Image (spheres, rainbow, N blue to C red):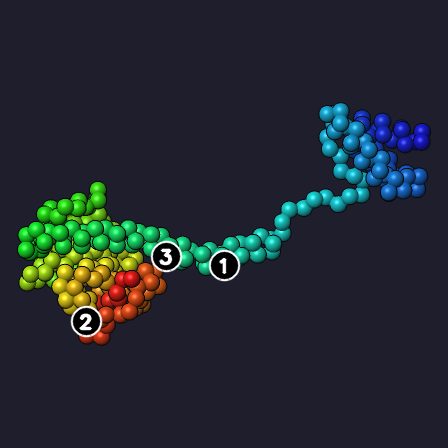
Amino acid sequence: MKKERCLKNCLKENKNKCHSVLDTESHRFPKRKQGEILNQVQDDNIFKGVGPVLRPYGAPLRSGFTLIELLVVVLIIGILAAVALPQYNKAVEKSKATQAFTLLKSLGQAQEAYYMANGQYATSFDELSVDLPAGFVPGGSFYTFATTDNHTNGEWVVQILKEGNSGNIMIGHPEGHAYQGAGFAYATQEKALYSSERGKFVCFEIKTYGPKFLRDKGDFCKKIMRAGGQTCGEGCAVDSWVMQ
């Protein structure tokens, strides 16, 4: 006990010197006992708020992560990102496309109201009772056949198509967008815009007369928007599906 007290006092004053003593006096202080003494001194120092935290004698040093462990973590993160990022991008696109489709439905209803009041469809958005959202300015190019009024906010182009007495409305992504050539249309007459009947909304992917849809067929309308049955495909300027 006297030796233990001396060793404790020594550790509090000079731990490096005492580690040397422990090494030379290992036959008097077994390693288990040495560890108990050092731990007790450490606890006393922490309790009193003095001295450094000592490593128990004979205990291994703590090491960081190995290079292989770090590489495994990086690999796992890369795999998760490769799986999750495309799904995230689709979710973002669906959210924005849903907003565009909601705008189209409002414009379609306003177009029908204008027809009921005037006996013909509007050829300009200024004639409708619904204002375009902030950020839409005149201009923009999308479907290039028989358009009378185009507005764009950089991400979407909305336009009125005048063919005969029709006043069809389209909204879609312009050239340069990840989903260029994809969008929605409201048909004010039967078989217009490849809709099977008047007053229907369709989702489309352009093949001609505008920015060509560069992705696989159905990537926008079927995989993102979950559109219904196809209304036109082979021989049409667009691939189109009924919006449910």
Amino acid type, callout 2: Cys
Q: Please rate how many residues cluster around mark 1, counting C-alpha atoms within 10 Å: few if below 14, some from 14 to 19, many from 20.
A: few
Q: Are the residues flagged by discs 3 and 2 in contact, CB closer than 8 Å?
A: no
Residue tagged 3:
90
Residue 100 lies left or right of residue 52; in this view the side is left
Image side of residue 221 versus residue 63, left or right: left
Q: Residue furthest front?
A: 116
Q: Amino acid at mark 3?
A: Lys
Quarter holding the N terminus?
top right
**Which comes sooner in the sequence, label 3 or label 2?**
3
Quarter of the image that includes the C terminus: bottom left
Task: Give the spatial CA distance, label 2 vs label 1.
Answer: 40 Å
Q: Residue under circle 1?
A: 79
* Residue at the spot 46% in from the left edge and 59% down from the top edge: 83
Front: mark 2 or 1: 2
Rendered residue at 22%/47% (across/down): 153
Q: Is residue 5 above or below residue 136?
A: above
